[in-house]
Every structure is written in C-alpha cells, then in structure tokens.
Image: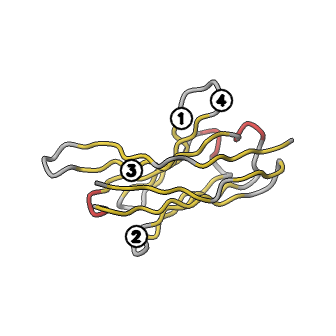
Amino acid sequence: QVQLVESGGGLVQAGGSLRLSCAASGSTNRINLIGWYRQAPGKQRELVAGINNGARTNYADSVKGRFTISRDNAKNMVYLQMNSLKPEDTAVYYCNAVVTTAWGSTLDAWGQGTLVTVSS
C-alpha cells in the first residue's frame, strides 16, 4: 500500500508561482512512476507531469516550460514547481503513483488533491 498526501495549493494571481508537494508513505519502494494530474471543473482529469525511477520526466504540452517536477527519494517527496501560472491552470491537483504489487501487477495510488486557483 502506498499513501500520498498533497500540500501547497492555494490562491495566486496570474503570473505567480506555487510549489506543490506530495509526501509518499508505505511501500514506496514499489513505486515505478509518480506524478501530478489535475482536474478542472467540468473537465476530465489530465496528466500534468510525471517522473520515473530514472528521473526521466514528461509534461503536458500546456505546462512545458512553466512547470517542473522533481523528486527527493530520500524523503519520499515529489514536487511540482509551477511558474507563470495562468487562470486555465485552476484545478484540483492530484498526486499519483503507479505501484507494482507483490503479485507483479500494477495499480494506481492517489492523493486527496489540493486546490490551485489562479485569478486573472
């Protein structure tokens, strides 16, 4: 079992910055990939950024050049630095981990989400 807890959301003006944090606990050694998704009102949840065990990253086109994902394996933490925020970045941001089970299958673990609101 892996538990994820996000923090760092809030209200920010357009052009501002926020840093989201995700604390992982439990069987963190079974995490293959960890990242951030977001869901805006009335929209589907979408991938924002991910990072694998080799520190390879991927980003949604809409956030490339503005957001940076990083991880601190020693602290079991993942961060999302968000710069040049836009009103369209407003959403609930979720931490997600792809976990290998003891039986070799994979499952998704999710945090409870943190709200980011960007005012114009």
Q: Secondary structure at mark 4?
A: loop
- Relative to 37, 98 lies left or right: left
Identify the residue at image location x=51%, y=39%: 47
Q: Residue furthest top?
A: 42
Identity, as a three-letter code, of the amino acid under mark 3: Ala
Mark 3 — residue? 97
Measure how far apart labels 3 and 4 are at the Cα level. 23 Å
As displayed, is residue 73 above or below residue 39?
Answer: below
Identity, as a three-letter code, of the amino acid under mark 2: Asn
Mark sitting earlier along the chain (2/3): 2
Mark 4 — residue? 41
Q: Secondary structure at mark 2?
A: loop
Identify the residue at image location x=39%, y=50%: 97
Mark 1 — residue? 46
Measure how far apart labels 3 and 1 are at the Cα level. 14 Å
Mark sitting earlier along the chain (3/4): 4
Identify the residue at image location x=38%, y=56%: 3
Query: Closer to the observer: label 3 or label 4?
Result: 4
Identity, as a three-letter code, of the amino acid under mark 1: Glu
